[in-house]
Image (cartoon, coloured by chain):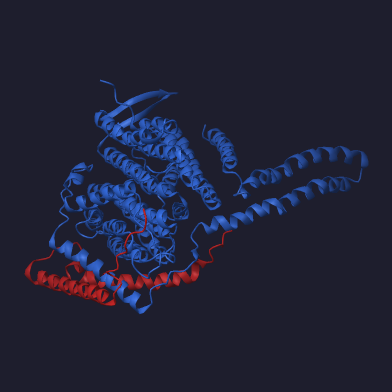
Amino acid sequence: MKPGKPLNFLDAPETQKKFRKYFYIILCVLLIIDLAAFFLFERHGHFPWEEVPVFNAVYGFTACVGLIFIAKILRWIVKRKEGYYD
Amino acid sequence: MIKSIPVAFIFIAGSFLIPFLKGRVKSVYMLSLPILAFINLIFLPKGLSWEIGFLDYTLILSRIDNLSLVFGYIFILITFIGMIYAIHVKDDIQHVAAFCYSGGALGVTFTGDLFSLYFFWELMAVASTFLILAQRTTDARRAAFRYFMWHFFGGVCLLAGIVLYVSTTGTIAFSYIGLSDLGTALIFVGFCLNAAIFPFHSWLPDVYPRATITGAVFMSAMTTKSAVYILARTYPGVEVLMWAGAFMTCFPIFYAVIANDMRRVLSYSLINQVGFMICGIGIGSQLAINGVVAHAFCHIIYKALLFMSMGAVLHMTGKIRATDLGGLYKYMPMTAIFCIIGAASISALPLFSGFISKSLTVAAVAENNQTIIWLMLLFASAGVFHHAGIKVPYFVFFGHDSGIKTCEPPFNMRLAMGIAAFICVFLGVYPAPLYSLLPFPVDYQPYTLFHVIGMLELLMFGALAFTILILSGFYPAELRAINLDTDWFLRIPGRAFIKFCGRPLKTIGDTLSSHISKMVAWACMAPAVSEIIEKKVDKIFHKILTAFPSAIYTWMKPLKTETREISWNLLYIFASFIFILFFILFLGG
């Protein structure tokens, strides 16, 4: 099989911007639904913080930022050249 | 009607015919073996069958119950998918090894006694070694040697444990064991090694990236998941496993973020996913065991899908490092979509298979009021989306344009990925068939408003963090480098130890043998007596004292030559194995 005609639809910066815009809209919609659900329905969780709205959003965001920070420190400790074991 | 035979033998015996077949017949034969095994499995009677007397014990080759059946189905299914993926490979050794390996996994699943368990266990280790060796590079050969050493260590622990266990309890039944004494602890270590539990995990990210493209697909499915099955059967509710599992879900994420080889990223995320299962086994409740089985089922499919998509990239471009790849969606859109489906499933995005299986385990943890474990698993859920869910597709198919011009992989590869992707979505949308297979009745509804919203929030805001960090340039850049793991403790001090055996230890032995008799003679001051003493002392010291260091030296010397022919090394290991076997039997008896 020879390389076919490449798709290029994601190369344009405008398209990337558009994708990011949609992504932010999705985030806002999620938050709105969560808050709405908090006021409309009773929420049952095993842990008290599960009943706090947007807990998962905050946790997900901080976890991922923390993850990168720790990974950077870890890399500083364990990184070696590719031929280290040879 | 012909009587059904143990499923493992269909694969193991069937594999030996493969080298004698050619062309289309061979392809059809290889694809029909899993189908035959599946039909055979349906006709096998529930409960125990194929009981064979062996010495004073009874070997049970077929034990069909709710737990073993699910694992049997998934191992057969993944062998079928893997074979479609590998059908174009001309190398017969890989096919034979793959079938023996799956046969070993099925044997482990359906066996009912510890002796045959051990046999199939070792068969898996040996057969999978050939899936690495088939790569035929020096790097792969060294990796295969390390892999075999690891599993050999696990195998010896297991065997020693079994011997002690049998001598204390008098039974070889393969059922609940539980941690109580040395024997059970040794069995536990043997199983933990295959389940890649910290600190015995480093063989996995070391070896899987070096296996053949198709071999890695099989390996990602069998070794760890058969260990999960065994642990679920023998050590459910052991609290150590709960903490070990929770730790396993967290620490590989950091490594996955900074790894460069994409199959290594997947290997680390494999450990992370197995962590969820191990944690569930540690909890041990019915809901938790259901979660473990469901997650193992879904995990095998989506992890194989991810390995297949990365294998397809490696097959077409010859490159697998994040530093060399990027922008491939232009030429491999279909592979990109399959990879994204696998990534969405592993991240437990609603409507994909990971969502309906992982939540069972997490719910079991909450039900057990394990606050810290629950938070760790939640962190791991966000983290897995970060590295396996976004990093893998992003750095390979999007990100910076690497300028590689390529095309979609062969039809059979796309077909295999398509089937796996279909199952991922199907189970995510309609989990009832999987739930009905689980060992205990399922009273769980994954699709509730709060659960879906909560999971989406967790993942999407994790994605937001990724977006912000990438745009700000803070995200760790892809680098051509390796990262040290716990295998450093074996590979570097291990070399030093062999060097120590070579030079200093032998010198000490030689010095002792040449000087000690003289020193004794001098101390006696009487030539006639000293001559007699010298002879006696010489005999003792020369034979015993120097024999010990030089025996260690000669024993360890061949291990230094990792690069030497593997067959020689295997023979050597086999000899050591027989030696240890006798040693154990001698102690155990």
Near-viewer residue (B17 or B291): B17
* Image position, residue A7 (x, y; %): 29, 65
Residue B549 vs A16, above or below: the answer is above
Q: Is residue B112 left or right of residue B513?
A: left
Horizontal side of residue B189 vs B295, given as left or right: right
Tell me, yes or no, if residue B62 can be seen here.
yes
Seen at 27% across and 58% down, the residue is B337
Drawn side of residue B564 relative to residue B422, left or right:
right
User: Color of chain A here?
Assistant: red
Query: Picture coordinates of residue B78 (x, y %)?
Result: 32, 43
User: Which image quarter holds the N terminus of chain B?
Assistant: top left
- Looking at this rendering, what residue extends furthest in the bottom direction? B472
| Place of residue B524 in the rendered image (x, y in percent of width and height, measured from the top left) | 88, 45
Q: Is residue B320 left or right of residue B283?
A: right
Q: Which colour is chain B painted?
A: blue
Q: In which quarter of the image is residue B70?
A: top left
